[in-house]
Every structure is written in structure tokens, then in C-alpha cells.
Image (cartoon, rainbow, N blue to C red):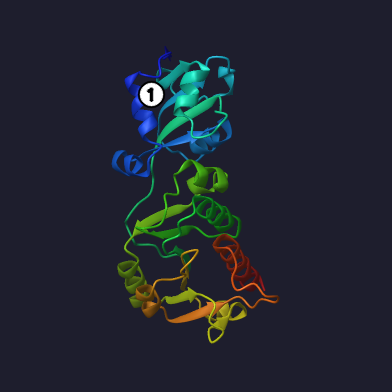
Amino acid sequence: MEKITSSQNKTVKNTVKLKQAKQRHECGLFIAEGIKLIRELVSAQYKIRYCFVNEKADLSELPAAIDCNTVFISPQNVMQKISSFTTPQDFIAVCEIKETDIIDTDDIFILVLDNIQDPSNIGAILRSAEAFGVKTVVLSVDCCDPYSPKALRAAMGSTFRLKLIRTQLTDFLNYKKKQGYDIIGTGLDKNFKTIDKLCQSYKKAVVIGNEGNGISSEIMQICSFGMYIPMDGKNESLNAAVAASIILWENKRQNNE
């Protein structure tokens, strides 16, 4: 173990850069804050490059799988510099991203996210995806980063147990369509099918659109058909994460019947 007491240390500066999505993408690294997330990372066999630990923390909390030579002991001011939150956690890890652009997956249900911009929505969607048995989530290249601090916090570890594919959606969806998948676009048009018809399709990729604008017209043109959630009251739409969760639950319910 090594002590790092200065916020001007090179490793500290390089870690702080990872707060930016561009730097995470270029380096292939992200920051995970808190012992719970770090344990989830170890369990999911993510590669942890190094950890910062508050000098007052109990080192015995670290998973045994973490090499002590990759652990830096630091004071509160350094932990605060690295952290993205007002009150920093006692354990902060820098890990390798497992996202891929390889579009081959044979899952019969694939969740697709088109330009989702709120990291809390991304995280909540990934958490629901795992809860309802989804294995693969495909993100458009313009989706916000699922490895951002807010997204990771909202996902509660689900990010690490899903296969995440970031790719050009037109290529991916056209490829899956040729493989016999129904591409289902979600929206508000009452001419669409209602979600109780969801499992009329055996192999399907369900697309959740942007919070404000929905699915892009380019992607909607690829869709086999549209699907909507019937609602009462005067609300025109649902939050993207809520809508995704309802659809995922309905898919599981219909499959279990």
C-alpha cells in the first residue's frame, strides 16, 4: 500500500479526469464509489486498476481479491477531490469498462435505449432490466454514459451484471430484423399495439426513446410496429425509466403465464 496525501499527485489528477464522460470513454476506465459497489465489481469479475481508501477507514472491509499494491491511503481532502458527491465515500475504485460494440447476441428479448440523456434514468432502467430477467441492453452512441457516478448509483450494481452494447442502432436493429426479430418501438400513438400484445412476438428488441422527443424517426422507420402503455388521467407520458420498467414487468408476466 502507498500513501497519497496531495491532491496534486499525478494519479489523483488522472482519476479526477474520469469524472468526465469523454475521459472515461478514451481511457476505458470509470470511478466506482463506495464499498458496496466495489464488492459488486469484484463479484462481477471487473478489473479494478486501483483503489483510494480514506486513512480513517477500516481496511478489512476491502475484498480480499483486491491487490494491496493497488491501494492508496489518502486523507479526506484527497477523497473529496476524487469524489463526485458532496460527501465522499471511504472507498473509491478505478475500474475497466466492460461495454462492447459487438452486436451479436441471441437473447430472445433485447432492451434498446435510443438517446436516453438522464443518467438517473439509465441507472434505473438497468436496475429494472436485471430485476425482470433481461440479459442484454443496447445503447445508442448518443445515450448518456451508464458508467457515470449518478447512473452507477441509480443502478445499484446492476450495470456490472448486464451485457451492455453501445453501437449505431440502425446497424444493430437492421441486423436483428434480418435474424427474425420484431423491432418494437414504444411511444404514445394510440394506433400502436397495447403492451398486452407484447409477447405475440417471440424474438424482439424493444426500443425506449429519448425523455423529451421519444424514438428518433430514423429508428422508428426500422421498427416492425409500435407499442404503447394505456393510461388514465391527464398525463401525456411517463418517465422513460418508469415506462421501461412497466414494459419489462409485462414481458416477464406474459412469459410466466
Q: Residues within 10 Å of mark 1 (few under 14, many from 20)?
A: some
122 vs 14: above or below: below
Residue 219 occupies quadrant = bottom left
The x, y position of residue 112, in whole percent, is 44, 64
Seen at 33% across and 28% down, the residue is: 14
What's under tag 1, amino acid-wise?
Val
Seen at 65% across and 69% down, the residue is: 253
The x, y position of residue 48, in whole percent, is 42, 32
User: Camera-side residue: 107 or 169?
Assistant: 169
Can you identify the residue that label 1 sits on? 12
Residue closest to the far bottom? 191
User: Camera-side residue: 255 or 92?
Assistant: 92
The x, y position of residue 127, in whole percent, is 57, 52
The x, y position of residue 211, in whole percent, is 50, 63
Q: Quadrant of the N terminus?
A: top left
Residue 10 as seen in the image, left or right of residue 251: left
Secondary structure beneath disc 1?
helix
Seen at 64% across and 72% down, the residue is: 235
Q: How many marks?
A: 1
198 vs 112: above or below: below
User: Camera-side residue: 175 or 119?
Assistant: 119
Residue closest to the far front? 234
User: Camera-side residue: 150 or 44?
Assistant: 150
Q: Quadrant of the C terminus?
A: bottom right
